[in-house]
């Protein structure tokens, strides 16, 4: 058997290649070309490795095409992010995490005692409404609701025109419709009706006189609307000497307004100062009586109980059909 394979041990046999064309092809390449091929192969392999590591090491970021990038969206996003406090763990206190930065971005000034997200939205909406009402009138015909609304708003905010008008609108339009005024000599006690005057002041001129009332949702049943009422100034201030400053300031205010009305009436009135003082004392005395009634009336311990309430229809009947 050794004799049979002896031919493979010879050098001549080892020189014969298994693939004859391969040795011939390789031997035909230059040394530099061979090095270049090896370098290209290694570089390609490294690039493939880096691509694989990059794609597997980071999550794929999907760019949404419908992301809002308008000025309003960016402003809202900036507002939300600005109110956040990222130093807080959201799992422990999510509210502080989401809104903890609000106090730092909304400092109180000397005229503001509090600022909240709701109050900020309220004043921002107020400013938007003000800008709309101050814009030029588009529909200016006689029956235009836009023109009427903007004219009314301008009449209430135009300080220059109000200063020029002084007390004339009150003297010429309101006083005659409410029965006149004692100080000017235009009031007639025999024909004046207090009920009619109160109705006009409260309903036609939207001004609280002697008392105030409002319609609001029932605390116990949100489906109901009830009337709440009370004095224009809290009754406690009328009855306690330690709060005399408030009552004196109220009298001073009435006295000042009365003096200005006499001046703007262009009427020569004898003893005007004395008459104004009588008017102030009468008005204050009426409010003082209401304060005493409020303070010394037997208290209702549960004013919201159904059995303690009365309907407007029954109240009208009990008061002699006074409530309209």
Image: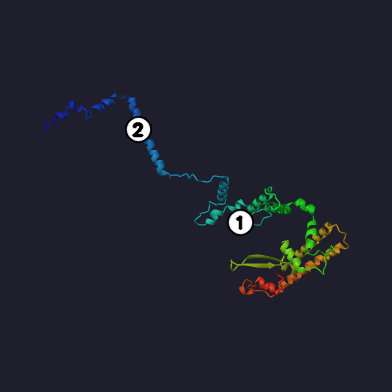
Q: Residues within 10 Å of mark 2 (few under 14, many from 20)?
A: few
| Residue 140 image position (x, y, % from top left) | 70, 49
| Residue 65 image position (x, y, % from top left) | 49, 44
Res. 281 visible in picture: yes
Instruction: Determine the CA span between mark 2 and mark 1.
Output: 67 Å
The answer to whether residue 99 is above or below residue 277 is above
Residue named by callout 1: 118
Left or right, residue 290 beside residue 81: right
Residue 271 appears in which quarter of the rendering? bottom right
Residue named by callout 2: 41
Residue 37 appears in which quarter of the rendering? top left
Asked if disc 2 and disc 1 are in contact, CB closer than 8 Å, the reply is: no
Left or right, residue 29 beside residue 6: right
Residue closest to the eye, 129 or 52: 129
Mark 2 falls on what kind of element? helix
Q: Residue at x 35, y 32 (%)?
A: 41
Residue closest to the eye, 178 or 259: 178
| Residue 100 image position (x, y, % from top left) | 56, 54
Comes first in the chain, label 2 or label 1? 2
């Amino acid at each position: 058997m050794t004799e049979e394979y002896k031919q493979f041990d010879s050098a001549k046999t080892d020189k014969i290649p298994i693939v004859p064309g391969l040795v011939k092809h390789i031997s035909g390449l230059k040394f530099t070309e061979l090095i270049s091929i090896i370098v290209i192969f290694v570089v390609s392999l490294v690039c493939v490795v880096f691509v694989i590591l990059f794609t597997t090491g980071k999550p794929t970021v999907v760019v949404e095409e419908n992301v809002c990038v308008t000025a309003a969206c960016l402003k809202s996003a900036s507002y939300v992010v600005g109110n956040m406090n990222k130093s807080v763990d959201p799992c422990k206190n999510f509210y502080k995490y989401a809104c903890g930065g609000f106090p730092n971005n909304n400092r109180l000034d000397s005229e503001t005692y509090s600022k909240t997200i709701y109050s900020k939205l309220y004043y921002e909406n107020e400013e938007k409404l003000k800008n709309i009402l101050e814009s030029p009138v588009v529909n200016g015909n006689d029956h235009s609701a836009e023109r009427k609304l903007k004219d009314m708003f301008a009449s209430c905010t135009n300080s220059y025109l109000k200063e020029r008008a002084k007390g004339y609108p009150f003297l010429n339009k309101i006083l005659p419709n409410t029965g006149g005024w004692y100080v000017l000599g235009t009031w007639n006690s025999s024909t004046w009706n207090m009920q009619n005057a109160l109705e006009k002041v409260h309903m036609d001129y939207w001004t609280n006189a002697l008392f105030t009332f409002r319609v609001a949702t029932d605390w116990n049943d949100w489906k109901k609307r009830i009337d709440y009422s009370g004095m224009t100034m809290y009754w406690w201030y009328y009855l306690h000497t330690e709060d005399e400053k408030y009552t004196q300031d109220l009298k001073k205010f009435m006295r000042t307004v009365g003096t200005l009305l006499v001046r703007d009436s262009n009427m020569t009135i004898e003893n005007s100062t004395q008459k104004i003082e009588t008017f102030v004392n009468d008005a204050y005395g009426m409010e003082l009586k209401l304060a005493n009634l409020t303070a010394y009336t037997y208290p209702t311990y549960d004013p919201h109980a159904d059995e303690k309430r009365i309907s407007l229809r029954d109240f009208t009947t009990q008061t002699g059909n006074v409530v309209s």
